Amino acid sequence: MNREPHPFVLTLLQWFRENGRQLPWRDTSDPYAIWLSEIILQQTQVKQGWAYWERFMQQWPAVERLAAASEDEVLRLWQGLGYYSRARNLHFAAKQIVALGGFPTTIEGLRSLKGVGDYTAAAIGSIAFGLPVAVVDGNVYRVLSRYFGISTPINTTEGKKEFALLAQELVSGLSGKSGCPGDSGNSGNSGIYNQAIMDFGALQCTPAAPRCADCPLQESCVALREGRVGELPVKLKTLKVKERHLTYVYIRCQGYTAIHRRPAGDIWQGLYEPLMMEDGQLSIINHPLSINNGPSSIDKHCQLLRQNVKHVLTHRVLYADFYLFDTDERPVLPSDYFWIKEAELDQFALPRLVEKLLALLP
């Protein structure tokens, strides 16, 4: 016998009917469109990701088209979104899906796709296929921890288990009833609820300055009643941020410049950049710019355009110096560098930091 949905769920669904965001990937049950939106929004705000989703859907309207594209084409269209491993995983997973003959329709099958973890599998499975599984991410942690007054740290094994069980229990209560007036049956109910709690966390129960005064859950919210809204959710501080200092030299030689593709095993894998030096690890071969000649050689032969440009990543803070080297003779570079026309530079996918630096070129 089906249980009645929790009052929290019923209130959330009613709020969603009245306040939910109108997003283009919500107007379809196409798993490709939904999967694409979830990958883009993994570490990107909706207002930025929306335009990228539309570009991808226009360029590759079906997963078969995306799978047939080159990695460079995918990275180029992704440029500016950051966390480029998402784009590489997206491309790889598209090939997996084509090889499978279509999208997996089970949580286990969805998890087998490159770049699809528990949250993304739950989102795709519940929204596209109506699977009764709950999503759990930052928004969900925040909403549940505040409403139920849970102080277990969300980044501990105990906390992850506790929140996952609670989230799934709330979804399970939807079996056979959506809780929304006019809805019947269980088709898509978990998907509706998952979208509701995500929107509620993004619009109502926000990290800073949550709208408690007009919150439909205010009478039963434990955190509000106990004055703990600003304290929840609890997260242990474990992240160590590393600083890196980079030196970029843009070589301009009779309308050409030299770039290379960043290798695997570091940030910006597969993206392109001009000559880069870090902690003496790279030199220009047989040329006065060689850092083997000492740091002053760069200052002597190059024009400094900007110093200590700060760029923040999740686990790193980068500081970059940017130089222009204008020469009539091509220096001999390491073998992975190649020459292109300056006018063709925008055909290559570049890290956002490099884009910012190139904007400084005279």
Image (cartoon, rainbow, N blue to C red):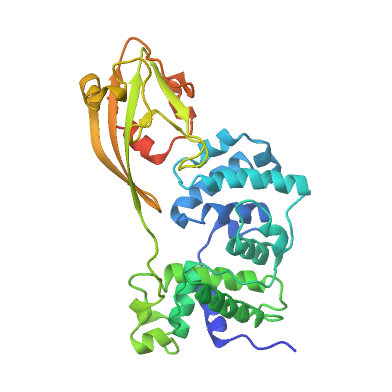
Relative to 185, 199 lies left or right: left
Is 272 drawn above or below residue 5 in the view shown?
above
- Residue 9 in view: yes
- Quadrant for the C terminus, please: top left
Image location (x, y in percent) of residue 88: 57, 43
Is 3 drawn above or below residue 84 in the view shown?
below
Is 152 drawn above or below residue 355 in the view shown?
below
Q: Which is nearer the eye, 30 or 2?
A: 2
Q: Residue at x 67, y 64 (%)?
A: 125
Is 236 drawn above or below residue 175 in the view shown?
above
Q: Residue at x 56, y 75 (%)?
A: 161
Q: Can you name the residue that lies furthest to the top here? A: 328
Q: Which is nearer the eye, 202 or 43?
A: 43
Image location (x, y in percent) of residue 173: 65, 83
All told, the count of numbered labels is: 0
Image location (x, y in percent) of residue 194: 58, 70
Occupied quadrant, residue 329: top left
- Quadrant for the N terminus, please: bottom right
- Residue 180 in view: no
Occupied quadrant, residue 45: bottom left
Image location (x, y in percent) of residue 197: 52, 72
Q: Residue at x 36, y 21 (%)?
A: 284
Q: Which is nearer the eye, 318 or 57?
A: 318
Relative to 106, 343 lies left or right: left
